Image (spheres, rainbow, N blue to C red):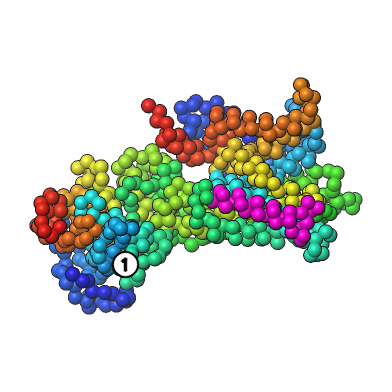
Amino acid sequence: MSEPHIETPQEADEANARPVDRPIPTGGVVDEKPAERSNDVLLEVDNVTLRFGGVVALNEVSFSLRKGEIFGLIGPNGAGKTTCFNAMTGVYRPTSGGIRFQGESIVGKKKHEITRGGIARTFQNVRLFPEMTALENVMVGADAHHKTSVIAALFRLPRHRNEERTGQDRSYQLLRFVGIEHRAGDVARNLSYGEQRRLEIARALATNPTLLCLDEPAAGFNPAEKADLLALIRRIRDTGVTILLIEHDMRLVMGVTDRIVVLEFGKKIAEGTPTEVRDNPAVIAAYLGVPTDAA
Amino acid sequence: MTTEATGSTSAQQAAPDKKKWKSNGGARGWYSRQSPLVRGVLAVVFAGLAFLLPYVGEVPLIGPQIVTQGIDWPSALFNISYYVLLALGLNVVVGFAGLLDLGYVGFFAVGAYTTALLSSPDSVLKTEWGWLATVPIALAVAMLSGLILGWPTLRLRGDYLAIVTLGFAEIIRIVATSTETLRGDRGFSDIPHPPGEFADGKPIFGVADAVPYYWLGLGVIILVILGVRNLDRSRVGRSWLAIREDEEAAEIMGVRTIKYKLWAFAIGAFIGGLGGVMFAGQQGFMNSQTFVLQFSILVLAGVVMGGSGNIAGAILGGALISYIPDRLRGIQDPIWHTDLFGFRFAIFGAVIIAIMIFRPQGLIPSRRRAMELKDRAKEVAPIE
């Protein structure tokens, strides 16, 4: 399957002039009405191959994310999901292939440039700044879009103080949004595991992303926590943020995503709505280990 | 300055051990609970007391114990002031940004040499500027040297950066020793003192009285403290802390890591250069022997001893590394009847070892640094 290429965001904005080769996702088993979504492609992963020496971590993987959807990236352990994430956020540079975000290539861009451009992420293993307070952690994210820097900070210029204040207010709001406002003053390492995961999401949201990538956000959660997380993910999507979700837990993925790509051994083996993917024999084989010729 | 700082340390130590890391007890906790007005007044009082330090010898009973004997007390105080300045600068690099810099003396040298080149009659430039005129240029050159050193090397991490900075300081020293322009051992003499005259026409900054130099140093220190504190509490400080804790995560969260590391280097170099300029202005003479490697190590030891990442800690550490050896001057040991100053490094080593054993986070630790250290200790030896 090849997705249409987009050269400029302006072109993409021309009222859905471009036919997309799939219908608007229905949301699968989700009980909510899917919000009205455009067919605009937000992120396009185009034939990305990533090799580490002799190991092919990603093999000609292509898929694209549309604005406003919740997109799932799933696959068994070692399938290359996090590697794919890392390629998108600038941690790894693809050996070949292109990644375009809002029509602009982001291959070879610096990590912080990609973040400022609108892609934020969380980590599979929580990577907060452990000795900073929860609020400060979020403020680091909020700083990404602040203009004043060393000179203004040195003399505490009014512009700088304003930015600090708005950054702080916004960070508080985000902490409230993810439900851990009461821990604002506590250092991150003293937060519970679930709170840390939420804090990571708040920190990523503080960078004002268009696309939020969550790397196994529910790992180690009990069912109640997972339900809360699902609600949070939907609330984030409702604010207009597109979400890319890596997840192990099939039930969670099926419940929340609009579309899914399945990776196995670095190759895309399926793509579609949750129901389509669930019934795909290759996916069943990958997850249950039924021997097939295709694998 | 020294006395107040130590006072708060012992109060800190007296706090119950269990709560040591995040306790709001002790002098620091009490201070942080006061209203901004009270804190401001206290800070002014402390600063005022620091300005009166040259006359501490007049205080009955305690005074004579504090003042140095083998070196006149105001000179010792001036020495303290530029060591404190260097410790404050190095604290930005090592304590805030977490970049191990073993060649900090290099920036001190750059500042001092620029002043000497522009002002001393021995210089090939023959400009013979006044001291004050050299200050902005010396600081700019020091900062520039920080950027030049930092630009290619800040991509290195940890030990590798330390090795490169070590090399940098040695390069500066060897260049100073072996080039004709920088005059090696012969050095520069007659570097002018800072300007200013009393009403009766005598210069304020003379040869005999070091008190004005100390006051000048103290004034500069206060300005530096204010600036560094502002940075530490802003997004700049947050960025440094984020880089120190998880550089990659920081960058993925949008922190321009190279930019902020370069700034840390440049600010450190600026403050180091400032120390060098003041040193040159007070001494009037300097040569390449002034900038030996052990100087860098000493300042680093001061920062670590006082409490890396904490401004008060850096001040205390910087003051101690200068004060302890000076205090030892002119005291005879009971066995060999030699000057204890000769044993300064032995005593120093013992003190540092003791501090590393009993208070590895430094005398006035940064709370965050202390916890980072504790984390590492836990990784090494689980408590259970």
User: Within 10 angstroms of label 1, few (less than 14), some, or many (20 or more) residues?
Assistant: some
Q: Please state which amino acid type lies under the numbered disc 1.
A: Ser
Residue A81 % position (x, y): 26, 55
**Quarter holding residue B308:** top right
Q: Position of residue A107 (x, y in %)?
A: 36, 66
Residue in the picture at 14% in, 56% down: A283
Verify whether residue B176 appears in magenta: yes
Find residue A109 and report its image quarter.
bottom left
Residue hosting label 1: A96
Which residue is nearer to you in this view: B372 or B20? B372
Q: Is residue B339 visible?
A: yes
Q: Is residue A212 visible?
A: no
For image coordinates 80% across by 63% down, the residue present is: B124
Q: At x 15% / y 51%, what residue is drawn?
A: A287
Q: Main secondary structure of the magenta part?
A: helix
Relative height, residue B300 to residue A33 (above, below): above
Say whether residue A228 is magenta: no
Looking at the rendering, the stretch of residues picked out in magenta corresponds to B161-187
Dot 1: element: strand
The relative height of residue B258 versus residue B323 in the rendered view (above or below) is below
